[in-house]
Image (cartoon, helix red, strand yellow):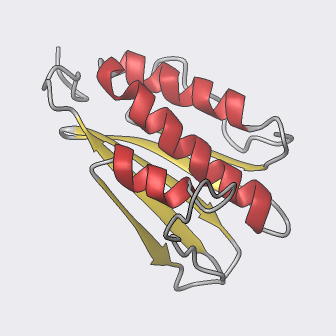
Amino acid sequence: MNHATELLDLGVGDSYRLTFTVGEHSVRPVRRILRMYLVGWGLDGLRDAAELALTELVTNVIRHVPDRHCSVLIARREGGVRVEVTDGCPALPTPVRLRGLAEHGRGLLLVDAVTDRWDVTVLRDRAGKTIWFECDDREGVGVVAGDP
Protein backbone atom coordinates (compact mmCIF):
# COMPACT_ATOMS: atom_id res chain seq x y z
CA MET A 1 0.00 0.00 0.00
CA ASN A 2 1.34 3.35 -0.82
CA HIS A 3 -1.41 5.85 -0.19
CA ALA A 4 -4.33 6.00 2.21
CA THR A 5 -6.86 8.75 1.57
CA GLU A 6 -8.34 8.75 5.05
CA LEU A 7 -6.83 8.36 8.47
CA LEU A 8 -7.76 5.31 10.48
CA ASP A 9 -10.53 6.09 12.97
CA LEU A 10 -9.05 4.77 16.18
CA GLY A 11 -12.45 5.18 17.80
CA VAL A 12 -13.76 2.43 15.50
CA GLY A 13 -16.69 4.25 13.91
CA ASP A 14 -19.39 2.74 11.71
CA SER A 15 -17.25 2.45 8.59
CA TYR A 16 -13.81 2.89 7.13
CA ARG A 17 -12.74 3.53 3.54
CA LEU A 18 -9.23 3.09 2.23
CA THR A 19 -8.18 4.02 -1.31
CA PHE A 20 -4.78 2.81 -2.45
CA THR A 21 -2.67 1.05 -5.04
CA VAL A 22 -2.13 -2.54 -3.97
CA GLY A 23 1.09 -4.49 -4.17
CA GLU A 24 2.23 -7.95 -3.24
CA HIS A 25 2.36 -7.03 0.47
CA SER A 26 -0.92 -5.12 0.72
CA VAL A 27 -3.20 -7.89 1.92
CA ARG A 28 -1.84 -8.24 5.44
CA PRO A 29 -2.34 -4.60 6.55
CA VAL A 30 -5.86 -4.49 5.05
CA ARG A 31 -6.75 -7.68 6.93
CA ARG A 32 -5.46 -6.10 10.15
CA ILE A 33 -7.67 -3.06 9.64
CA LEU A 34 -10.69 -5.30 9.03
CA ARG A 35 -9.84 -7.33 12.13
CA MET A 36 -9.58 -4.18 14.25
CA TYR A 37 -13.04 -3.05 13.19
CA LEU A 38 -14.62 -6.47 13.68
CA VAL A 39 -13.16 -6.74 17.18
CA GLY A 40 -14.24 -3.18 18.00
CA TRP A 41 -17.78 -3.95 16.86
CA GLY A 42 -17.92 -7.19 18.85
CA LEU A 43 -18.02 -9.26 15.67
CA ASP A 44 -15.01 -11.47 16.40
CA GLY A 45 -16.90 -14.51 15.14
CA LEU A 46 -16.86 -13.09 11.61
CA ARG A 47 -13.09 -12.62 11.47
CA ASP A 48 -12.06 -15.81 9.67
CA ALA A 49 -14.72 -15.61 6.96
CA ALA A 50 -14.44 -11.86 6.38
CA GLU A 51 -10.64 -11.87 6.33
CA LEU A 52 -10.52 -14.77 3.86
CA ALA A 53 -13.06 -13.12 1.55
CA LEU A 54 -11.27 -9.76 1.70
CA THR A 55 -7.95 -11.47 0.98
CA GLU A 56 -9.41 -13.05 -2.15
CA LEU A 57 -10.88 -9.79 -3.44
CA VAL A 58 -7.72 -7.75 -2.87
CA THR A 59 -5.65 -10.54 -4.44
CA ASN A 60 -7.91 -10.36 -7.50
CA VAL A 61 -7.08 -6.65 -7.82
CA ILE A 62 -3.36 -7.46 -7.62
CA ARG A 63 -3.67 -10.13 -10.32
CA HIS A 64 -6.28 -8.71 -12.68
CA VAL A 65 -6.51 -4.91 -12.43
CA PRO A 66 -3.82 -3.28 -14.61
CA ASP A 67 -3.25 -0.18 -12.44
CA ARG A 68 -3.86 -2.10 -9.16
CA HIS A 69 -5.79 0.87 -7.81
CA CYS A 70 -8.78 0.11 -5.59
CA SER A 71 -10.93 1.26 -2.72
CA VAL A 72 -11.95 -0.91 0.23
CA LEU A 73 -14.99 -0.07 2.33
CA ILE A 74 -15.60 -1.84 5.64
CA ALA A 75 -19.05 -1.03 6.99
CA ARG A 76 -20.91 -2.10 10.11
CA ARG A 77 -24.49 -2.93 9.28
CA GLU A 78 -27.30 -4.17 11.44
CA GLY A 79 -26.70 -7.87 11.83
CA GLY A 80 -23.11 -8.01 10.57
CA VAL A 81 -20.56 -6.45 8.27
CA ARG A 82 -20.36 -5.45 4.61
CA VAL A 83 -17.06 -5.18 2.76
CA GLU A 84 -16.70 -3.65 -0.71
CA VAL A 85 -13.71 -3.63 -3.05
CA THR A 86 -14.04 -1.17 -5.93
CA ASP A 87 -11.66 -0.91 -8.89
CA GLY A 88 -11.62 0.83 -12.27
CA CYS A 89 -11.29 -2.28 -14.40
CA PRO A 90 -14.39 -2.94 -16.53
CA ALA A 91 -13.73 -6.70 -16.75
CA LEU A 92 -16.19 -8.60 -14.60
CA PRO A 93 -15.05 -11.57 -12.54
CA THR A 94 -16.19 -14.99 -13.62
CA PRO A 95 -16.18 -17.79 -11.08
CA VAL A 96 -14.78 -20.95 -12.61
CA ARG A 97 -15.70 -24.53 -12.00
CA LEU A 98 -12.75 -26.31 -10.48
CA ARG A 99 -11.18 -29.13 -12.38
CA GLY A 100 -8.75 -31.07 -10.27
CA LEU A 101 -6.42 -28.94 -8.18
CA ALA A 102 -6.52 -25.71 -10.18
CA GLU A 103 -3.92 -23.18 -9.08
CA HIS A 104 -6.05 -20.14 -10.00
CA GLY A 105 -9.75 -19.35 -10.16
CA ARG A 106 -10.78 -20.40 -6.68
CA GLY A 107 -11.14 -16.92 -5.17
CA LEU A 108 -14.81 -16.27 -5.85
CA LEU A 109 -15.68 -19.85 -4.99
CA LEU A 110 -14.09 -19.24 -1.58
CA VAL A 111 -15.91 -15.93 -1.19
CA ASP A 112 -19.18 -17.69 -2.00
CA ALA A 113 -18.41 -20.48 0.47
CA VAL A 114 -17.53 -18.31 3.49
CA THR A 115 -19.88 -15.32 3.16
CA ASP A 116 -23.63 -15.02 3.43
CA ARG A 117 -24.01 -12.88 0.30
CA TRP A 118 -21.81 -11.43 -2.40
CA ASP A 119 -22.28 -9.83 -5.78
CA VAL A 120 -20.79 -7.48 -8.34
CA THR A 121 -22.13 -4.01 -9.05
CA VAL A 122 -21.07 -2.27 -12.27
CA LEU A 123 -20.20 1.40 -11.70
CA ARG A 124 -22.51 3.75 -13.58
CA ASP A 125 -20.47 6.94 -13.43
CA ARG A 126 -17.17 5.49 -14.66
CA ALA A 127 -15.52 2.28 -15.77
CA GLY A 128 -15.18 -0.31 -13.09
CA LYS A 129 -17.02 -2.40 -10.57
CA THR A 130 -17.59 -3.04 -6.91
CA ILE A 131 -17.41 -6.57 -5.60
CA TRP A 132 -19.02 -6.79 -2.20
CA PHE A 133 -19.81 -9.37 0.43
CA GLU A 134 -21.73 -9.52 3.67
CA CYS A 135 -21.23 -11.71 6.70
CA ASP A 136 -24.05 -12.07 9.20
CA ASP A 137 -23.56 -12.11 12.95
CA ARG A 138 -25.37 -15.33 13.82
CA GLU A 139 -24.56 -14.95 17.51
CA GLY A 140 -26.20 -11.52 17.61
CA VAL A 141 -23.65 -10.07 20.01
CA GLY A 142 -22.21 -7.31 17.82
CA VAL A 143 -22.39 -3.75 19.08
CA VAL A 144 -24.62 -1.53 16.93
CA ALA A 145 -23.64 2.09 16.51
CA GLY A 146 -25.31 4.24 19.10
CA ASP A 147 -25.73 1.42 21.64
CA PRO A 148 -24.65 2.34 25.16
The x, y position of residue 32, in whole percent, is 60, 23
The x, y position of residue 119, in whole percent, is 39, 67
Is any atom of residue 17 visible in this view? no
Q: Quadrant of residue 66?
A: bottom right
The x, y position of residue 114, in whole percent, is 36, 43
Q: How many marks?
A: 0
Judge left or right: residue 144 versus residue 109.
left
Is any atom of residue 54 visible in this view? yes
Q: Residue at x 33, y 49 (%)?
A: 134
Q: With respect to residue 77, does 139 lie above or below?
A: above
Quadrant of the drawing holding the N terminus: top right
Q: With respect to residue 94, does 132 lie above or below?
A: above
Judge left or right: residue 72 versus residue 37.
right
Judge left or right: residue 72 versus residue 116.
right
Quadrant of the drawing holding the C terminus: top left
Q: With respect to residue 101, does 81 lie above or below?
A: above
The x, y position of residue 145, in whole percent, is 25, 29
Q: Residue at x 22, y 23 (%)?
A: 142
Q: Quadrant of residue 10?
A: top right
Q: Residue at x 75, y 67 (%)?
A: 64
